[in-house]
Image (cartoon, grey):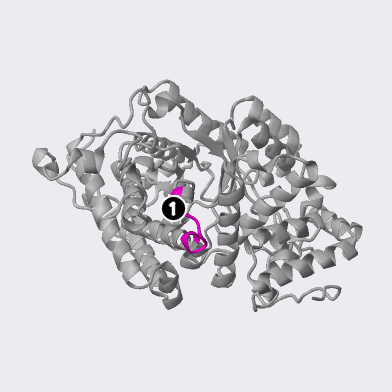
Amino acid sequence: MATGEDRRLKGDGKTQSGIEVKEVYGPEDVAGLDYQEEIGAPGTYPFTRGSYPRMYRERLWVDAQPALGGSTPYVSEKGIDRERHFDRLMTAGVSTGGTRTGGDMHNLATVDPDHPLVRYDAGACGSISYSLWQMLEGNETILPKLVKKSLDEGFVIEFGHQVGTADVCDFTRYLALMEVQGWDTRKFRGNMVNDPLTSHITGSMNYKQPLEVGFRVSCDAQEYAYRNLPLYRPTNGGCAYDLRESGIDTFQELAFRFGNFIEYADEMVRRGLKFEDFGGRPAMAFSAEIDFFETICKLRAARRMWARIGAERYGAEVAKMKCPPVSTNSAGNSMTYQQQIFNVVRQTIETMASVLGGVNGMELKGYTEAVSPPTTEAFVVNAGIQRIIAAESNVCLTADPLGGSYYVEWLTDHIEKKSMELLGQILDKGGIRACVRSGWLQGEVERAAQERARELEEKRKIRVGVNMYQELADYDIPLPQFNFTRGKPGAPYTKRQLKALEVWNTFKRSRDLEKVKPALKRLYHAARDGENLVRPMVEAWKAYASIGEIMGVIREGMGFSYDQFEMVSRPEWLAY
């Protein structure tokens, strides 16, 4: 029988971001709120209650499971044909309206797969992807199928690398594929994270990419898409999800995200675009945290912050503003190695919070997130979570069903105000790029991460099976896992890696360098002379240049070293 102590609420009584919560809220807590100015109706300024009027009565969120890049190692390990696997997922409804594609470590770093930094981990993170040749003559059969599905059926493809240059490499390679095949690029539907600023804030895989290179490539792709691809979202304006995974709180997540967004938006205005031309295109991608109400209110506050920034900073006409979609990734930081079946429960809570917050797109992590890429079984579980919420719970029948709650409205307002205050501090310091160059932002992230760790150590925040109720992890509840094997010192590559590198060598032997050279030379001069890089990147892909060569040439054209890691040199056959 449970004792009184067992039944007492654990933790410090604050939200995940340290907000003091009263035992009860009432009318006095929202007395200062103006309904029309701060809440309003769904689909109208300031979009607190949702991005379109009827919300889920009109259309449900996009279920963008990472059914390709993320599961590639698991599929390969099981000896399953990738194309048949993908077709089965689509036919069974496991992946429906969209998917996120992602590449391997070398893609994140925008280097070739035989680069000394990453070659021994080839295939550990996702598919090894480096050329247009793979799509036309090699073994990348799924990606062309996905692109055609996007053009014909409106299937949403997201490039989820975060680091900007890696996403733009995927983006321009897909454009090259469409042009070679004679497909209409204006029908291309999807989005990319394309946020190099975040990689410098969090120190991710491409942190050594010069900031100037990442920002230039990112903004060139954004401008090109805004002018030429009406259905495509070329950035999420700041990858709040990846920022949050570094250990920051909700206020920082919103402030850093909109600080990034303002950097990109200011550059687009400098290039002659109006906010009305692009402001509603970047999707807002946040982390669906385990703190239920804080996640709901964060999404409501984010839409309101976007609306205010558009109207007050850029002078957008309120009546013509169209709120961009809001998406979430379930929080990887909440997933545990201990008793992984509990992660399914955590996913369910985070998914429900996203829906009640008015999300338009969602990606759920696999229950294996703490240790490995997802399994197919994890995708099926995630699809079931979303279908049950949509079809059985009836929470989708009305827009913003928690709107009007004293607590929800107070918390939404509190999150917005504190986040805007922090954003103001960032802008006063010169903006996100200035804060990155000074190191101030990285210091804030490090301090926040250390505080998150202390909260768990001191049990101010509880993680079941980790720092409390550890006895629940003693029960063996086996789930399908992916076990990536690496080579040994005497034989550093596995059979699967050796096969992938053999394909890479076939690619290098089979191409005509007399076609590659002029395309890369043209790209070098475009980078040197300040031209938009998208067209010359597309032409370089068509000539069968590799990802490492394309980014190496851009770096040299901008006055930096060919390899940002200073480990390889420009190929001897390439001269400008």
Bounds of the magenta span?
268-276
Q: Single out the residue that lies furthest toward the left.
A: 28
Circle 1 SS class = helix
Return the x and y of residue 504 as percentages of the image width and height.
Answer: 82, 57
Q: Quadrant of residue 35?
A: top left
Query: In this rendering, does residue 327 appear at all?
Result: yes
Query: In this rendering, does residue 80 appear at all?
Result: no
Return the x and y of residue 170 as percentages of the image width and height.
Answer: 66, 53
What's the residue type where badge 1 is placed?
A: Phe
What residue is at 88 percent from the left and 58 percent from the top? 511
| Left or right of residue 349, residue 147 in this image | right
Task: Assess whether residue 173 is covered by the magenta stretch.
Answer: no
Q: In which quadrant is the N terminus drawn? A: top left
What residue is at 79 percent from the left and 46 percent from the top? 180
- The residue to which callout 1 is attached is 275
Residue in front for this viewpoint, 574 or 535: 535
| Left or right of residue 352, residue 504 in this image | right
The number of discs equals 1
Residue in front for this viewpoint, 234 or 112: 234
What residue is at 48 percent from the left and 39 percent from the top? 362
Q: In which quarter of the image is residue 37?
A: top left
| Left or right of residue 29, residue 484 in this image | right
